[in-house]
Image (cartoon, rainbow, N blue to C red):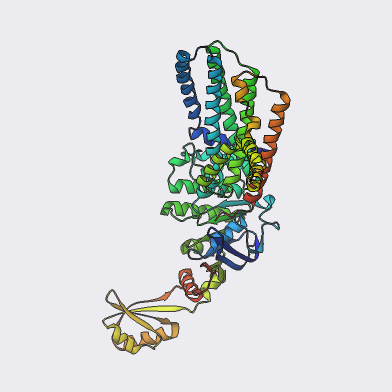
């Protein structure tokens, strides 16, 4: 999957004279077999990107290609499994009928179709409820059936829009396990979410989208190690003011649950540790603070504030 | 491609069946029974004509309204409910999707027209009358009229919401039965504007009277083959233009 300079401006209103920019100059490239996460807050342009790739929305400028072909080409979408955000399968069908219909649309038939329908419904844990009408399903069951239809034809590329949103912990775990199993089989996975632990658990590479632009990108490891390491020191028997007086100015000290907790860079916290021991303070805890994708996400969000993307421009 | 088309078309019929649309046939059966009982006591001398007129009229009205209802909100409903995301993201073109939905609607309407026709002829047999050539032509003509109406509904729903599409489709249905009268009235007018408007309406609106043979059926007047097939070709041609426009518009639409 390749996207070059992808932009999208929606025209709204009765006269189509109001413009809202949803995406601006996005470049993306997925390598075969990798899991790529698009991370971003609501309105960042994640779903718009996926919709352009699935031919649901036409880009205003730029181009995307799936297996070397335009997403408008039906052949390009033949090897793609798509799970949209809040999927809505036909509720007058049973789960089995819906998955079967989707299997037919991607070109399966006969015994192969029968076998695959049974198999994917088993993978998502829906074999027992497969013959109930979808209108009787819970949100989690709908999500599972929608994932089953995306897997029916053993896609080479799996495009998932918020696959775990709204699911209970069991459903989330199952969804994650299935995605990981698909990745192990060599399926390329592109998924977008604002649930950061999912990205950390599943993705090789990440792009952080804010206001329609990719503001960070790289492997999960690269992005996390790029940040300076921080340490946290919790002290008992001293007030926050006493600890602050011993610490370097850049060290942040606050009172948490009766302990003075100092956070700062490695060398500064080590120096503070010595001073606290000399001052007969009791060290309750000394640990590295893991810089998470969540911190990275929040940092990127702060930096990117003030752009015109995602809001009305005319 | 053909298998996908057939699967989507059959799915359209299944949707109508499971949403109990076929109850219209049951309502039609009850209406036939009641009107039959009422008419035998009041209009003995012209019973055959009145039964044909009422039966075909009820069939036409109920199926035409159903055609408008089924087609006018079809695409907008799919977009609003987001069911379309899971289908058009498959290797299915937008045009194929739209035409298969049209086929699904026509399977539903054909099945209902067949069931209603059987009930209608059953009623005639019950009263000792037989099916006539104009009656068969009237039922056949109604099928082509339904084809035009569903095509129109689909075209409208490719860019407008359900209520707008429904209202416009109903207005066109009514005007489509009056377009020849509008033309005649316009030609007699002294105003150039009215003349131009009347002619424009005549050429733009579907002339549904070309496939309406209910009058001939009621008075048992033989329907000429050329008139029937000419009307059928006109209806199919008009529908092809509507569907073509629908495919063009629908193919360019964004699904936000």
Residue A152: percent from left, percent from top: 59, 45
Q: Quadrant of the N terminus of chain A?
A: bottom right
Residue B164: percent from left, percent from top: 52, 46
> Residue at left 48%, top 44%?
A125
In terms of depth relative to the viewer, which is nearer, B122 or A100?
A: B122
Above-or-below relation of A273 to A312: below
Above-or-below relation of A59 to B163: below
Looking at the image, residue B35 sits to the left or right of residue B90; the answer is: left
Residue B227: percent from left, percent from top: 71, 27
Residue A177: percent from left, percent from top: 50, 54
Figure label count: 0
Residue situated furthest front in the rendering: B190
> Residue at left 55%, top 13%?
B125
Residue situated furthest top in the rendering: B128
> Residue at left 55%, top 15%?
B48
Above-or-below relation of B124 to B84: above
Q: Is residue B4 visible?
A: no
In terms of depth relative to the viewer, which is nearer, A107 or B176?
A: B176
Q: Is residue A271 visible?
A: yes
Q: Quadrant of the C terminus of chain A?
A: bottom right
Instruction: Tell me the quarter of the picture where residue B137 sits.
Output: top right
In terms of depth relative to the viewer, which is nearer, A220 or B200?
A: B200
> Residue at left 71%, top 58%?
A68
Instruction: Tell me the quarter of the picture where residue A288 sits.
Output: bottom left
């Amino acid at each position: 999957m390749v996207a070059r300079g992808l932009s999208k401006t929606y025209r709204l209103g009765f006269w189509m004279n109001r413009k809202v920019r949803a995406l601006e100059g996005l470049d993306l490239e997925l390598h075969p077999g990798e899991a790529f996460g698009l991370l971003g807050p609501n309105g960042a342009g994640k779903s718009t990107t996926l919709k352009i790739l699935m031919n649901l929305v036409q880009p205003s400028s730029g181009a995307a290609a799936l297996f070397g072909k335009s997403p408008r080409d039906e052949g390009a979408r033949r090897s793609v499994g798509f799970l949209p955000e809040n999927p809505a399968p036909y509720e007058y069908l049973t789960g089995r009928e819906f998955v079967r219909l989707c299997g037919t649309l991607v070109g399966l038939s006969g015994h192969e179709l029968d076998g695959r329908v049974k198999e994917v419904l088993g993978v998502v844990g829906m074999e027992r409820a497969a013959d109930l009408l979808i209108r009787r399903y819970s949100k989690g069951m709908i999500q599972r059936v929608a994932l089953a239809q995306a897997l029916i034809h053993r896609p080479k590329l799996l495009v998932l829009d918020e696959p775990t949103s709204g699911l209970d912990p069991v459903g989330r775990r199952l969804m994650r396990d299935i995605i990981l199993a698909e990745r192990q089989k060599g399926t390329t996975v592109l998924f977008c979410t604002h649930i950061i632990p999912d990205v950390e658990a599943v993705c090789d590479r990440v792009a952080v989208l804010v206001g329609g632009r990719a503001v960070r990108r790289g492997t999960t490891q690269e992005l996390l190690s790029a940040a300076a390491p921080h340490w946290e020191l919790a002290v008992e028997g001293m007030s926050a003011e006493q600890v602050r007086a011993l610490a370097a100015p850049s060290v942040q000290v606050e009172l948490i649950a009766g302990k003075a907790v100092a956070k700062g860079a490695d060398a500064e916290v080590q120096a503070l540790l010595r001073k606290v021991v000399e001052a007969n303070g009791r060290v309750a805890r000394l640990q590295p603070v893991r810089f998470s994708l969540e911190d990275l996400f929040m940092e990127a969000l702060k930096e990117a504030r003030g752009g015109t993307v995602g809001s009305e421009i005319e | 491609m053909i298998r996908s088309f057939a699967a989507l078309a059959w799915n359209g019929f299944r949707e109508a069946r499971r949403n109990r649309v076929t109850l219209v046939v049951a309502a039609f059966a009850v209406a036939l029974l009641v009107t039959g009982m009422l008419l035998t006591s009041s209009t003995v001398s012209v019973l055959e004509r009145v039964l044909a007129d009422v039966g075909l009229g009820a069939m036409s009205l109920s199926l035409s309204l159903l055609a408008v209802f089924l087609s006018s909100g079809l695409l907008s409903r799919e977009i609003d409910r987001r069911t379309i995301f899971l289908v058009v993201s498959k290797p299915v073109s937008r045009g194929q999707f739209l035409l298969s939905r049209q086929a699904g609607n026509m399977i539903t309407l054909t099945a209902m027209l067949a069931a209603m026709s059987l009930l209608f002829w059953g009623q005639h047999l019950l009263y000792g009358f037989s099916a006539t050539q104009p009656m068969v032509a009237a039922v056949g003509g109604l099928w082509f009229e339904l084809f035009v109406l569903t095509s129109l509904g689909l075209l409208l729903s490719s860019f407008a919401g359900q209520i707008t599409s429904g209202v416009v489709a109903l207005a066109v249905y009514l005007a489509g039965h009056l377009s020849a009268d509008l033309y005649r009235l316009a030609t007699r007018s002294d105003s150039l504007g009215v003349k131009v408007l009347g002619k424009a309406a005549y050429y733009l609106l579907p002339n549904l009277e070309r496939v309406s043979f209910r009058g001939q059926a009621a008075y048992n007047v033989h329907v000429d083959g050329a008139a029937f097939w000419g009307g059928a070709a006109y209806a199919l041609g008009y529908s092809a233009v509507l569907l073509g426009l629908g495919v063009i518009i629908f193919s360019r639409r964004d699904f936000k």
